[in-house]
Image (cartoon, rainbow, N blue to C red):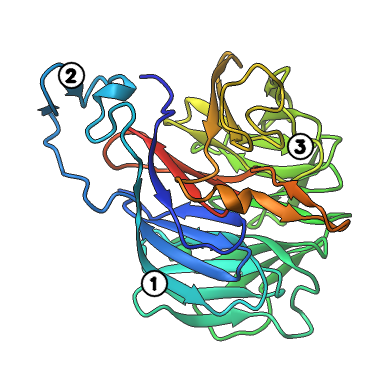
Amino acid sequence: MAFPQVPISHLLGSNGPIHALAYSASPGTYILTGSADRSIRLYNPQPTTPVHPATAYVTRKPGIQPYDIKGGGSRHDVPGHAAGQPVSSGRLIQTYSAHGYEVLSLSISTDNARFASSGGDRSVFLWDVATAQTLRRFGGTAQSHTARINCVAFAGEDDMLLVSGSLDATARIWDAKSNALKPVQILSEAKDAITSVAVCGCEIITGSVDGRVRSYDVRMGRCTTDVIGPPVTSVYATKDAKAVLVGALDNKLRLMDRETGNMLRAYEAPGFRNENLRVQSILGGKEQYVICGDEMTADSTGGSTTAAGSGRLWAWDILTGEVKAKVSVPWGPAGYEPRKKAVGRDGKEKERVNVMSCIAWREGGFGDQYCVGGTSGVVTVFGY
């Protein structure tokens, strides 16, 4: 099956750039977004999507071949997404408001009952999904983070712990089940900001601006450090926890063997740019693809027929390192073009660049689906 490149939905409502995305646990029906406007929003990206039997074929109209659910199909085979047909908008279900600053990271519990968020207000919030109320707030004490919290993730059995990483160069572990205000443990080996965390069983992986990836074995009290070199902006572990995908500010992604520290494969391309901004990289398609955003717009390198300001997404084959797709991400639906203008410090109007800074891939559910967000404040959902 080809890499999905057809927008199937736009998620609207944010009044600022999107910094964080997360799918609900399998089957991944809902999408949670975190924005610079200090709000978190819960969407159903396809509220009218029909449910098809696992062996069914769907034919929309004469002249269009059936869409083979088992074997995939072309972009024109997908129900409701024939060429030229407008992209629908997802349904906003709930808005969560408690942050006083921008929301930078989200993590959803495996039972979908709770989620955690972090951001510029130096606190981790634990939320109840159904009531939209905060259950706990981790912060505000002498043992709390002293700067913005870039990342947060659930950890431990039954998601009883939370791990947060901050601009203050520490990662902290919090007990989500007790009323303790102090962190369970503080990981302070990093020499610069923690940009990303990943959890693999009893191990915690952190990426830092100091160019290191650190793996903490909590049970053994051991820290293993891998030197990458350039500032690390993203870490994403494989499901078997044997390798980790590392994004760094040198126009290159690396798949690192966690046992030996060797680089298994590098992912780069002549037009791919990531030198200054924090963009997320993930694995998708049952770990078939390496996916990452780009600092450049789709038309920045010339020769493109995409609309000005469109964002760009890259997908590589995880085994060969071959570029499988370069996806142009629209600024948004018709009518969002005026938001592409911004007033600079010199008082003159300038074109804004739609940098794709966050990505999430749906695990489980019908067909391949992922969503991307960035500068425009619109989340675009791609899939079959």
- The residue that disc 1 covers is 129
- Using the rendered image of the protein, determine whether residue 156 is visible from the camera's viewpoint: no
Of callouts 2 and 3, the N-terminal one? 2
Which quadrant holds residue 150? bottom right
Considering the image in quadrants, where does the N terminus appear?
A: top left
Residue at 42% x, 31% y is 286
Which mark sits nearer the N-terminus, 3 or 1?
1
Q: Relative to residue 347, is residue 238 drawn left or right?
A: left
Mark 2 lies on a secondary structure that is: loop
Which residue occupies the foreground of this view, 53 or 11? 11
- The kind of residue tagged 2 is Ile
Q: Is residue 98 above or below residue 345?
A: below
Residue placed under numbered mark 3 in the picture: 248
Q: Quadrant of residue 16?
A: bottom right
The quadrant of the picture occupied by the C terminus is top left
Query: How far apart are labels 1 and 2 at the CA level?
Result: 41 Å
Q: Is residue 44 visible?
A: yes
